[in-house]
Image: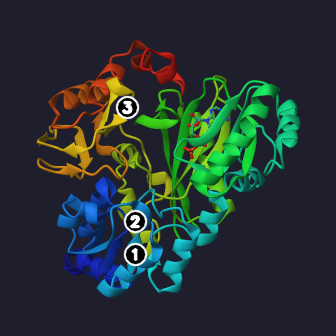
Amino acid sequence: MLLILQSYLKPFFTLIKEDTMFRKVLVANRGEIAVRVIRACKELGLKTVAVYSQADEDSLHVHLADESVCIGPPLSVDSYLKPAQIISAAEITDADAIHPGYGFLAENAQFAQMCEKSGVTFIGPSPENIRMMGDKSLAKENMQKAGVPTVPGNKGILKDVDHAIEAAYQIGYPVILKASAGGGGKGMRIVGDVDGVQKTFKVLQGEAQAAFGSPDLYIEKYIQRPRHIEVQLIGDTHGNVIHLGERDCSIQRRHQKLVEEAPSPAVSDELRDYIGGVSVQGAKGIGYRSAGTIEYLMDDQHNFYFMEMNTRIQVEHPVTEWITGVDLVKEQIRVAMGEKLSVTQADIHLHGHAIECRINAEDPSRNFAPSPGQITAFHAPGGIGVRVDSHCYTGYHIPPFYDSMIAKVITHGHTRQEAIARMRRALEEFVIEGVNTTIPFHLKVLEDPTFLEGTIDTTFIERIHFK
Ligand code: ADP
């Protein structure tokens, strides 16, 4: 009798416990990730506040949230990138936590600090961790200290072009020059010789200053035809950190991910245990909490090299959710409430294979030029093993001011082959009219023999007929 009563009351107590921490979450983002976070909040019984720019009044996240606040004009520098406006919106609506999503202010340590000072919980890592990992060169040093293998390169920031030439000589060509504050696949150049360093150094410094607000550059060895392998982590405030396996994000165009899958076709169970363990060690070494990802390059000898740590939820998180059964966004919210992780490392088992295709409103036949405008018809695919995360609908107007990603299609299968067949079927079902999309491009990738074999690397798109 007592047992029955206990199990009957459990959901009630769980709800009360969660309720005591925070009740209302402001989502400081737009597009599909804002929708994703709002959905997680609803499932946890939390109220939601959407913020939006004047160009996003009709976006799905505004419709789905319980309340919404306009935070400024269309340009993101005047709206989604304005910490003061977002925190004011939280204060006005009495929100007790802010989820930053990805991009915009997600990896802005100052914003995380401002939230803390205003008494609003930032759903993410500590400002110190964001700062430490946001400076890519500093992040590398910290990971080295924690025993994580890194790309051979010069420690710290390059003083001038002569310093870069000397460092490149020590490392051996080809090398890659990178902006320390860079991100999103931007702010890096592969250089093959001294002449290249001389020509590139100043130009890249200027670009880095303009794009990221800092001219600092660092240098590392250019790994030939590597795979991009990343490890998903989550930690709580009680010192627990676990990994949820790896994702293979080698299908990239101009260093930007287009297709992601989990598990990687090139990672064995032993290798997963090793790299997962190393990543957990790295995260514990800096006292990390919340969701985060450590990105590595893996060469053809299966050597791993740390590239950077992303201190936020990532676009490609659904593939991991599908094969592990863990809702990463809900887990991220729970740990921000001070709860312990709901799963241990021993609970994590991988089931089947998942693939994600990022659908952009771009024209692949016109060098992927953005294709904003009104969507005149939108029918998302469905059926077994298909998930679509999107903020779009028939009649939605894609504004020209932001990222061109309009949907993520994720498929799952018992095997990689089944996940791919399902993806092909899903993309063929997907109807998006009125704008150009990258669906035809994805369908080409999905029938490429190299992709089907799984012998991909980060140069796949550039090397193989998809220019
Ligand atoms: P971002 O933060 O802009 O995504 P990353 O450091 O994660 O930058 O690198 C993005 C991509 O650039 C990688 O996935 C890989 O394809 C390429 N890349 C970065 N560093 C190297 C390197 N040392 N050797 C070879 N490719 C690299």
x and y percentages locating residue 54 in the rendered image: 27, 66
Query: The C terminus appears in which quarter of the rendering?
Result: top left
Q: In this view, does 110 lie to the left or right of 313?
A: right
First in sequence: mark 1 vs mark 2: 2
Mark 3 belongs to which amino acid? Phe
Q: Which residue is drawn at 24% across and 33% down?
A: 436
In this rendering, does residue 237 appear at all? no
Tag of residue 80: 2
Q: Is mark 3 on a helix, strand or loop?
A: loop
Distance CA(mark 1)–CA(mark 2): 8 Å
Tag of residue 132: none
Mark 1 belongs to which amino acid? Ile
Q: Is mark 1 on a helix, strand or loop?
A: helix
The residue indicated by pointer 3 is: 368
Q: How crowded is mark 1: few (under 14 residues within 10 Å), some or many (20 or more)?
A: many
Distance CA(mark 3)–CA(mark 2): 25 Å
Choose between 237 and 57: the one closer to the eye.
Answer: 57
The residue indicated by pointer 1 is: 86
First in sequence: mark 3 vs mark 1: 1
Circles 1 and 2 in contact, beta carbons < 8 Å: yes
Q: In which quarter of the image is residue 92?
A: bottom left
